[in-house]
Amino acid sequence: MSEVRIKAIVTKVIEYLENDKLLTLLTEQGNILVKVRGCKSLKSKLKFCTAPLFFGEYLLSYTKGRYIVMGCDCIDSFKVIAEDIDKFYVSNIFREMAYRLGRERVEDGLLVVLVKELSELSYSNINPLLAAINGMIRIMSYAGFGINWGDCSICGNHISDYFSLESGGLVCSLHQDATSERLSESALNLIRALTFSPEDIMEIDYSIVSVKEILNVISKFFTYHTESKLKSVSQYISILI
Ligand SMILES: [Zn+2]
């Protein structure tokens, strides 16, 4: 039996047997699966570190090919997120993206990016809708799928109003392909404002419809590259009015 201390965020929780839970932890090396024994009992001293998005330093023992949680020091529980419905849904999008990306071999940056996005969501007065767009773009970019929101990726034409999954961003009508869809003018204005004038984020004028349109297109882009659908995005879109 060996013990290890590791910084990690909970990205998935599964109820296991009567009293245990299985957690997927995003560590600096990607996902690991750990077991927390007896954490559903009221007396459990480990209950606190089994919530989704709990960020802590976990003490793990490695026995018979499995990690068991022996203790944990809280770094940040991001509890304030749960007090706001929009923030809650947005954090769930970041959690699902990190969980899916963490299954691949990752560099240590993914944990850092996730912590940064959750901290901004928790402790700044950023609008959660805009935080969702910005955070998704930054997480994708970290994963090597940066998106071009400027002129046509292929010819540089200023009139680029199609989003191409294949080209990884905006293209002109001449260079649109089978993976492209046309974005509305209001969605384009919103994404350009967010990308090119982020300092004016508090004054950005936007409609819910254009936010939905952008979240949808980024979600499709994620699926195109990772072959996994983001349920959390459709869940959030379904409650946005
Ligand atoms: Zn073009």
Image (cartoon, rainbow, N blue to C red):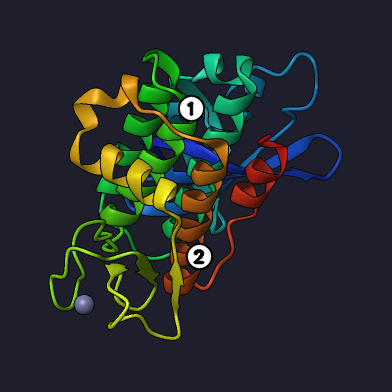
Q: Position of residue 75 (x, y in %)?
A: 40, 19
Residue at 49% x, 20% y: name it: 78
Image location of residue 40, percent across then percent down: 78, 27
Residue in front for this viewpoint, 206 or 119: 206
Tell me, yes or no, if residue 74 can be seen here: no
| Position of 109 relative to 239 (above/below) | below
The tag on residue 220 is: 2
- The residue located at (38%, 84%) in the rendering is 177
Q: Residue at x 81, y 34 (%)?
A: 19
From the viewer's perspective, is 98 left or right of 139? right
Q: Neighbour class for label 2 at 10 Å: few (<14), some, many (≥20)? A: some
Reading the chain from its start, which is encountered first: label 1 or label 2? 1
Indicate whether 144 appears above or below 71: below
Q: Quadrant of the C terminus?
A: top right
Q: Quadrant of residue 38?
A: top right
As drawn, is 79 to the left or to the right of 59?
right
Q: Which residue has dot 1 on it?
A: 128
133 lies left or right of 213: left
Q: Amino acid at mark 1?
A: Pro
Q: Position of residue 63 (x, y in %)?
A: 54, 50
Quadrant of the rendered image containing residue 161: bottom left
Instruction: Tell me the SS state at disc 2.
Output: helix
Ligand 1 is in which quadrant of the figure?
Answer: bottom left
Neighbours of disc 1 within 10 Å: few (<14), some (14-19), many (20+): many
